[in-house]
Image (spheres, helix red, strand yellow):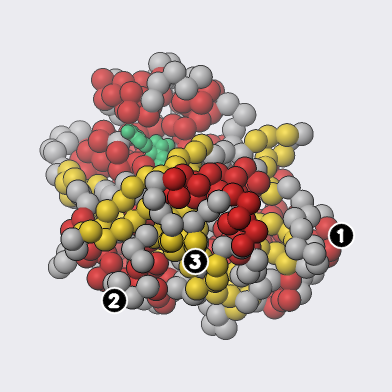
Amino acid sequence: MNNHIAVDIGASSGRLVLGTIVDGSLTLEEIHRFSNGFTERDDSCFWDVDYLLEQIITGLQKAKAGGVTKCTLGIDTWAVDYVLLDAEGNRIQEVYAYRDRRTDGVMEEVAKLISPEAVYAKTGIQQLTFNTLYQLYVHDREELAKADQILLVPDYLYYRLCGRKINEVTNASTTQLLNLASRDFDPELLALLQLERAQFAGLTEPGEDLGSISDSLMQQYDLPECRLICVATHDTASAVLGIPAQSGRSSAYISSGTWSLLGAQLAQPLNNRSAREANYTNEWGAYGTYRFLKNIMGLWLIQEVRRLDGSRYSFAELAEQAAAAEGFRSLIACNDPCFLNPDNMIEEIRLFCAESSQPVPQSPGELARCIFDSLALSYRSYLEELEALTGTAIEVLQIVGGGANNELLCQLTADVIGKEVLAGPTEATALGNIAVQLIQSGKVADIHEARTLIGQSFEIKSYLPRPMPQLGELLVRWEELNAAETATS
Ligand code: ADP
Ligand code: LRH
């Protein structure tokens, strides 16, 4: 059987992608694509997980209509968000989206009960307001006590498709509740939340066969015969698995989508004091690896500008308009918390520029240019930090995900970091998802072979740095801007 379907759902869109090996090459066919996003109601932000399930079913129906009668299937989504199930296996509550503001100030509250140093020593996970630890801390305690099982979003989607309840490890690590030493949920952190270990399922590693899609779903919706394979269910974990192998050159990556996740794959966690102070994370990867990385605000910034502008222009058009706008005119400190979920991103960017005495970007092209210039500069800062923390000089930066389509951003990044950028595949996440299915089915020996196959099967675009005479001056400006921001935030 040669049909492997990846369900890859990011914060902005989802897709079902069919992977097959043809003449020694891996081919991808997009079967179904749908939009995703959270909705705001009564000051809260929620995902619609029933809609996501419907989209998976629709995608599988399309696969069958296209001739797929048998397949394996893996699911990945964004991290940290959770679903509570009652003893009958029914969902208890709506699913909060991580940008919900109920966790504002909660990290500080929890820090009074357990020090951030202790949490980092246990978990190696960066401090983000939306880590599941903080979300669960503010969750209604009575409701939490009623939860028979706590699953993350992809775990829940697997459960709805085949009835198995798992907590998959790559995603479970983003809860900030797993202990690096015991490789299980940490009892002290669970006690802080008044939770029992039994409210979580057993930790499951990528590669496990979870069983067939339920007969009732198959018959009701006329779906293909489908075996569900546990993949690296955190989309960033799958994206990292989907990065083509690099031979002989040291590389770092950016998984570029709603977030820009910049980092390197490590064989051991790096959770020393410097890593904690720089707020780098050690998320667990498939096959015993760690994603040592930093969350950068990423293309969420342009997604919001585009949405508020009435989606008049495509992302490609916005990039074209940005290319025509004056470069490095106004800059924002992208990782400032004010950009996490502002009421109005356009106004927030303008306010930031005005308050830092810079020209205020007006047109969509000027706003886009401000975002891309600032992202490129922040990539440089964090890449330097990564090199210092890991003690490794990086020669090439690999950019995967939807952002690899943005030629302006890729070129600006190469120029500003002064290193080669290799862009693509744009569907690295789906590829990493399929890679685990290929390994599980025995078609590919291991992840190194899978990454080599990916490199041979997909076009990767190289961007070489162009001379930037004004770089020195620009970096001084950038440092001043970020120093001023740190001082006031
Ligand atoms: P996620 O998985 O987080 O939803 P994706 O990896 O799908 O994100 O990336 C989506 C982003 O990719 C968009 O927000 C957009 O900025 C960028 N993108 C996609 N296609 C293009 C394009 N043709 N030109 C420029 N940017 C693009
Ligand atoms: C990217 C991502 C990222 C997490 C965030 C919640 O989609 O999974 O790795 O930090 O969403």
Q: Secondary structure at mark 1?
A: helix
> In the rendered structure, which amino acid carries the disc numbered 2?
Ala
- Is residue 76 visible in this depiction of the protein? no
Q: What residue lies at 47% left-to-right and 53% top-to-bottom?
A: 7
Q: What residue lies at 29% left-to-right and 76% top-to-bottom?
A: 445
> Mark 1 near mark 3, Cβ–Cβ under 8 Å?
no
Q: Position of residue 3 (x, y in %)?
A: 37, 60
Disc 2 from disc 3: Cα separation: 20 Å
> In the rendered structure, which amino acid carries the disc numbered 3?
Arg
> In the rendered structure, which amino acid carries the disc numbered 1?
Glu
- Report the disc number at residue 231: none
Toward the viewer: 345 or 417? 345
Residue 363 appears left or right of 467: right
Disc nearest the viewer among 2 and 3 = 3
Q: Secondary structure at mark 3?
A: strand
Sequence-wise, which precedes: disc 2 or disc 1? Answer: 1
Residue 9 appears left or right of 66: right
Sequence-wise, which precedes: disc 2 or disc 3? Answer: 3
Disc 2 from disc 1: Cα separation: 47 Å
Farthest-out residue, top: 363
Label 1: how many residues lie within 10 Å, few (<14), some (14-19) or many (20+)? Answer: few
Residue 80 appears left or right of 103: left
Per the image, the residue denoted by label 1 is: 142
Quadrant hosting residue 121 = bottom right
Q: Position of residue 24 (x, y in %)?
A: 19, 63
Q: Please, is residue 187 above or below residue 107 in the view? A: below
Q: Confirm if mark 2 falls within 8 A of ligand 2.
A: no
Q: Quadrant of the C terminus?
A: top right
- Report the disc number at residue 445: 2
Label 2: how many residues lie within 10 Å, few (<14), some (14-19) or many (20+)? Answer: few
Q: What residue lies at 22% left-to-right and 65% top-to-bottom?
A: 452
Q: Position of residue 199 (x, y in %)?
A: 74, 71
